[in-house]
């Protein structure tokens, strides 16, 4: 099953031209500045998860691999995005503001201490 599925997937990607890759740092910055997700309005129905999902989708449509970052706090959670750049490593982006941020477990983020942090590629 695995080999057949893998082969079918490679064939599909080759025929449809779908592939994603890690951007360079400059490519990531150019994408961040051109993406319009940060212009969306935060509401009860459009929250951090939606900003993150939209930014992620837009990046992948441009051919860039983008991570979905999920942070937990003592009283809630938050989602942002990241790129694994080919020349400067991992960078985190707040998709609501386009700011490059540096979250880490035990550090403050938006006034809360991060208790856990994970990336879904």
Image (cartoon, grey):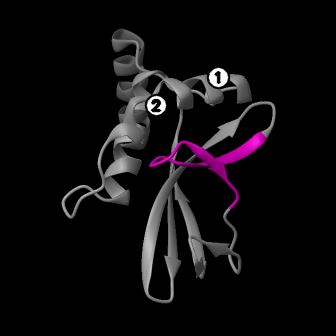
> Residue reaching furthest bottom?
74
Report the magenta stretch's main SS: strand
Tell me the number on the disc at residue 27: 1
Q: Is residue 116 magenta?
A: no
Q: Callout 1: 10 Å neighbours few (<14), some, many (20+)?
A: some
Residue underneath mark 2: 59
Q: Decide which of 105, 98 is in the foreground and name it.
A: 98
Q: Secondary structure at mark 1?
A: helix
Quarter assignment of residue 37: top left
Give the percent coordinates (x, y) of residue 36. Answer: 40, 31
Name the residue nearer the viewer: 29 or 67: 29
Q: Residue furthest left?
A: 45
Q: Is residue 14 above or below residue 84?
A: above
Determine the residue positioned at 24% across, 55% down. Answer: 46
Label whose residue precedes the other's in the sequence (2 or 1):
1
Relative height, residue 120 to residue 114 (above, below): above
* Residue 59 spot, x, y in % from top left: 46, 31
Q: Quadrant of residue 77?
A: bottom left
Viewer-side residue, 5 vs 29 = 29
Answer with left or right where residue 121 lies relative to residue 5: right
Which of these two is toward me, 82 or 51? 51
For mark 2, give the secondary structure.
helix
- Image: magenta residue range: 89-102
Task: Work out whether residue 1 can be spotted.
Answer: yes
- How many discs appear? 2
């Amino acid at each position: 099953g695995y080999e057949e599925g893998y082969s079918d997937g490679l064939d599909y990607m080759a025929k449809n031209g779908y592939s994603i890759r890690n951007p360079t740092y400059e490519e990531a910055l150019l994408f961040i500045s051109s993406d319009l997700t940060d212009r969306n309005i935060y509401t009860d129905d459009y929250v951090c998860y939606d900003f993150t999902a939209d930014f992620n989708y837009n990046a992948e449509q441009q051919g860039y691999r983008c991570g979905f970052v999920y942070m937990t706090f003592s009283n809630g959670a938050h989602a942002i995005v990241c790129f694994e750049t080919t020349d400067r490593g991992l960078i985190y982006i707040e998709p609501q503001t386009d700011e490059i941020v540096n979250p880490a477990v035990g550090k403050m983020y938006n006034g809360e201490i991060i208790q856990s942090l994970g990336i879904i590629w």
